Image (tube, rainbow, N blue to C red):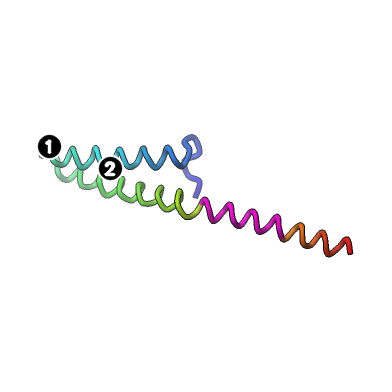
Amino acid sequence: MERFLAISPQSQFWLFHVALALNILGMVLTDMWLPMVVGAIVTTYLSVDALIRLRYVQPLKKEIRELRHELERASQARRDQ
């Protein structure tokens, strides 16, 4: 899921949401509907993807990492007995 490594997930979240807002504003203010609709669809996907990654995937990865460490500690304690 780590596609954009140069920017933090929080910054990606805000960047994509600002881009979506600008696309919607561009649709309202201009007559260029087709490019703006395509841009809005793409930025909506990126915004939702960033939101899911920030709220669900990262905490899940952290929890899995903690569970692996706990499992390693339990295995080590079992071997030491």
**Residues shaded magenta:** 58-70
Residue 76 in magenta?
no
- Crowding around mark 1 (Cα neighbors within 10 Å: few <14, some 14 to 19, many 20+) is few
Q: What mark, if any, has residue 20 been given in the picture?
A: 2
Give me the residue at 42% from left, 37% from top: 11
Front-most of residues 55 and 38: 55
Looking at the image, do the residues carrying marks 2 and 1 touch, with CB atoms under 8 Å apart? no
> In the drawing, does residue 15 fall left or right of residue 81?
left
- Dividing the picture into quarters, in which one does residue 71 lie? bottom right
The quadrant of the rendering that contains the C terminus is: bottom right
Whether 67 is drawn above or below 44: the answer is below
Q: Position of residue 42 (x, y in %)?
A: 30, 47
Going by the numbered disc 2, the residue's amino acid type is Leu
Alpha-carbon span between mark 2 and mark 1: 15 Å
Question: Of circles 2 and 1, which is in front?
Answer: 2
The residue carrying mark 1 is 30
> In the drawing, does residue 24 fall left or right of residue 66?
left
Element assignment for label 1: loop
- Dividing the picture into quarters, in which one does residue 63 lie? bottom right
Give me the residue at 46% from left, 42% from top: 9
Q: Earlier in the sequence, mark 2 or mark 1?
A: 2
Going by the numbered disc 1, the residue's amino acid type is Thr
Give me the residue at 20% from left, 47% from top: 37
